[in-house]
Amino acid sequence: MQRKILILGGARSGKSHYAQEIALKLPQPVLFVATAEAGDDEMKQRIEEHRKSRPSTWHTLEAATHVGQQIKQRAGKAQTVIVDCITLLVSNILTQYGHPAGELVEQEVMAEINELTDYMNQVKANFIIVSNEVGLGLVPANSMSRLYRDLLGKANQILAQQADEVYLMVAGLPFPIKHARN
């Protein structure tokens, strides 16, 4: 049975680690979709640490945007797909268009998420999606940050609706929010 899993949490809450733990228990091969871009040396180091934490048998697809389309083209025989993470995907789109292109950015983010969910529903692979929960803090002080929070919140809501299981990570511990229906 295909599983669609969304893992939410704050920064450094253990989301990626938990996604990998789940993937190790699911059918192989695994396609790991990385949305991070190495904009500076510190981010390059983080990306390298993430690469080293994954099994060498997993295939990696680096896709900063058009994730659904690129997965469709490159998934091959993958039985499990991890997308890590929606947080950076939304950021990539926002920085691509800049501000004040709010309406255009929202259209692009929603198109991206809809393309991903459409593909998730078309194939028999398992999907594990990782994203940050950004709605638990203060209202951001500037309009660009508020736009980012709002867009990521909308994306997370769509993904949570599509998912069979949703987990909230807190201090490395997974809390089930939505359970699979058997």
Image (cartoon, rainbow, N blue to C red):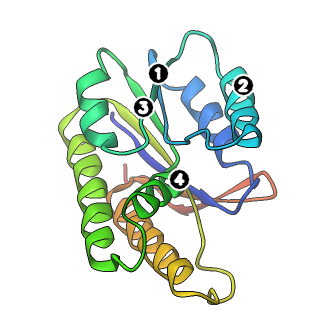
Up the image or down, 137 lies above or below 1; here it is below
Question: In the rendered structure, which disc, 4 or 2, sits on the residue that comes first in sequence?
Answer: 2
Quick one: SS at disc 4? helix
Task: State yes or no: discs 1 and 3 in contact (Cβ < 8 Å).
Answer: yes
How far separated are the C-alphas under marks 1 and 3?
6 Å
Q: Position of residue 91 (x, y in %)?
A: 50, 59
Q: Nearer the viewer, mark 4 or mark 3?
A: 4
Going by the numbered disc 3, the residue's amino acid type is Val
Residue bearing the label numbered 4: 88
Quick one: SS at disc 1? strand
Q: Which residue lies at the image location 59% right of the left edge and 67% below the top edge? A: 133
Q: Nearer the viewer, mark 4 or mark 2?
A: 4
Q: Nearer the viewer, mark 1 or mark 4?
A: 4
Question: In the rendered structure, which disc, 2 or 3, sits on the residue that comes first in sequence?
Answer: 2
Residue bearing the label numbered 3: 81
Up the image or down, 145 lies above or below 21; here it is below
Label drawn at residue 53: 2
Q: Position of residue 120 (x, y in %)?
A: 28, 42
Report crowding for label 4: few under 14, some 14 to 19, many 20 or more residues within 10 A (C-alpha). some
Q: Nearer the viewer, mark 2 or mark 1?
A: 2
Q: Which residue lies at the image location 29% right of the left edge and 47% below the top edge? A: 116
Going by the numbered disc 2, the residue's amino acid type is Ser
Left/right placement of residue 84 relative to residue 162 reads right
Label drawn at residue 30: 1
